[in-house]
Image (cartoon, rainbow, N blue to C red):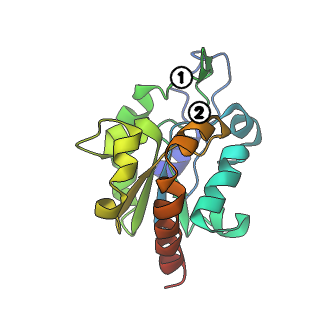
């Protein structure tokens, strides 16, 4: 059985969050860009389509791509730290359960061997993928040294409005560099 099919059938968290498991993942092993996010939102859980929410709209704008490009699995692999909606916490969605990454992540990342850019969204993906992770702001500020192979970005959630307001350099400097890198990969 294909690893992506195994993940789609995963039931590790059955009964843990009050929702039936519905793993959400996208990609072909030949994908050029890997998006490492946190976990699906409730909207994504319901639709089964990654970033099918306000966060996805902002993320596509940051990447400079349309929906057709974004949902092309030969271009974008969307591989969150957890594949199912983890339920709601006090101040937003619960963190991705660690069992998901422990079970699937390394095996899965080995399969995506043509990735030219990994986009690390939010603290959980950054903590996993960056050896020197301290916080999202510091990781995002490292964009000039992480590119061309990686970039760390805040979560594109509307809830991060205050972070974006406090860090205008991100949309002024990092986003144009990200768009340029994505365009180069997609059009080469």
* Secondary element at tag 2: loop
Mark nearer the N terminus (2 vs 1): 1
* Secondary element at tag 1: loop
- Residue 63 is situated, as x and y percent measured from the top left of the image, at 58, 64
- How far apart are the two marked residues, 2 and 1, measured between alpha carbons? 8 Å
* Circle 1 Cα neighbour tier, 10 Å, few/some/many (<14 / 14–19 / ≥20): some
Residue 107 vertical placement versus 115 (above, below): above
Q: In the image, which disc is placed on residue 84?
A: 2
> Residue sitting at 36 percent across and 36 percent down?
135
Q: Residue furthest bottom?
A: 188
- Residue 138 is situated, as x and y percent measured from the top left of the image, at 34, 43
Residue 110 vertical placement versus 147 (above, below): above
Between residue 31 and residue 151, name the one nearer to us. Answer: 151
Q: Quadrant of residue 76?
A: bottom right
Residue 62 vertical placement versus 10 (above, below): below
Q: Quadrant of residue 150?
A: bottom left
- Residue 169 is situated, as x and y percent measured from the top left of the image, at 47, 55
Task: Write down the residue under mark 1.
Answer: 13
The answer to whether residue 30 of the structure is visible from this angle is no
Q: In the image, which disc is placed on residue 177?
A: none
Q: Which of the two discs, 2 and 1, sits closer to the camera?
A: 2
Between residue 1 and residue 108, name the one nearer to us. Answer: 108
- Residue 56 is situated, as x and y percent measured from the top left of the image, at 67, 50
């Amino acid at each position: 059985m294909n690893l992506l099919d195994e993940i789609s059938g995963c039931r590790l968290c059955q009964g843990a969050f009050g929702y039936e498991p519905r793993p959400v993942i996208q990609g072909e092993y030949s994908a050029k860009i890997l998006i490492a996010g946190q976990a699906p939102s409730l909207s994504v859980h319901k639709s089964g389509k990654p970033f099918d929410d306000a966060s996805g709209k902002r993320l596509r704008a940051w990447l400079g791509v349309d929906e057709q490009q974004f949902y092309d699995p030969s271009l974008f692999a969307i591989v969150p730290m957890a594949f199912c909606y983890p339920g709601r916490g006090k101040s937003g969605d619960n963190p991705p359960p660690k069992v998901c990454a422990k079970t699937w992540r390394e095996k899965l990342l080995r399969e995506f061997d043509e990735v030219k850019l990994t986009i690390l969204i939010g603290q959980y993906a950054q903590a996993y993928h960056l050896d020197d992770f301290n916080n999202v702001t510091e990781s995002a500020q490292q964009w000039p040294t992480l590119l061309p192979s990686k970039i760390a970005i805040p979560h594109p959630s509307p809830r991060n409005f205050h972070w974006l307001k406090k860090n205008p350099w991100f949309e002024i400097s990092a986003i144009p560099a990200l768009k340029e890198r994505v365009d180069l990969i997609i059009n080469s």
